[in-house]
Amino acid sequence: MSKIYLEDVKIYGYHGVLPEENIIGTYYIINAELHTDLWKAAETDDLHDTISYADINEIIHNEMNIKSKLLEHAAGRIISKIHNSFPQVSYIKLKITKTSPPMQGEMKGASIELERSFTSNQ
């Protein structure tokens, strides 16, 4: 199986349970891993035979622009949108990190990660 990665996509967003998170916002770092067959593209050198990572990046940005209380909800929307747009993807792993969570102490961020496998019937 072949894989497409988008790594450390940095997006400013307004997600969170606390009201101030929806007003102030913060940066989020998104990492995506998609499994699909890339061998035809490897042979043809044709964009139509692959999944453009620019399209995946656009989906991520569009969905992160929609406010959510939970990062799990945003990640679920992103995964669903990717799969609906590209049903040839058999597996998606998505990690979202909130870089400045409103918690005590210093940290690099707080993250969630969702994974989903798809069969041809889904």
Image: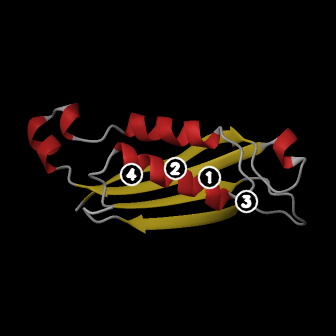
Q: Which mark is residue 13?
A: none
Q: Earlier in the sequence, mark 3 or mark 4?
A: 4
Q: Earlier in the sequence, mark 4 or mark 1?
A: 1
Q: Which residue is mark 2?
A: 78
Outermost residue to the left: 43
Q: Which residue is mark 4?
A: 83
- Contact check, label 2 and label 4, Cβ < 8 Å: no
Query: Between marks 2 and 4, how big is the CA–CA gap?
Result: 9 Å
- Contact check, label 2 and label 1, Cβ < 8 Å: yes
Q: Nearer the viewer, residue 105 or 65?
A: 65
Query: Between marks 2 and 1, how big is the CA–CA gap?
Result: 6 Å
Q: Is 121 placed above or below 83 here?
A: below
Q: Nearer the viewer, residue 91 or 108?
A: 91
Query: Between marks 3 and 4, how big is the CA–CA gap?
Result: 30 Å
Query: What residue sits 26% from the left and 52% below the top?
Result: 88
Q: Earlier in the sequence, mark 1 or mark 3?
A: 1
Query: What residue sits 33% from the left and 37% below the top?
Result: 52
**Horizontally, is 67 left or right of 53 in the view?**
right
Q: Position of residue 85 (x, y in %)?
A: 37, 43
Q: Earlier in the sequence, mark 2 or mark 4?
A: 2
* SS state under label 4: helix
Q: Amino acid at mark 4?
A: His
Q: Amino acid at mark 1?
A: Ala
Q: Which mark is residue 74?
A: 1
Q: Nearer the viewer, residue 79 or 109?
A: 79
Disc 4 residue crowd, few under 14, some 14–19, many 20+, Cα 10 Å: some
Q: Is 104 placed above or below 43 here?
A: below
**Horizontally, is 57 left or right of 20 in the view?**
left
- Contact check, label 4 and label 1, Cβ < 8 Å: no
Q: Amino acid at mark 3?
A: Lys
Disc 3 residue crowd, few under 14, some 14–19, many 20+, Cα 10 Å: few
Marks 2, 3: nearer the viewer? 2
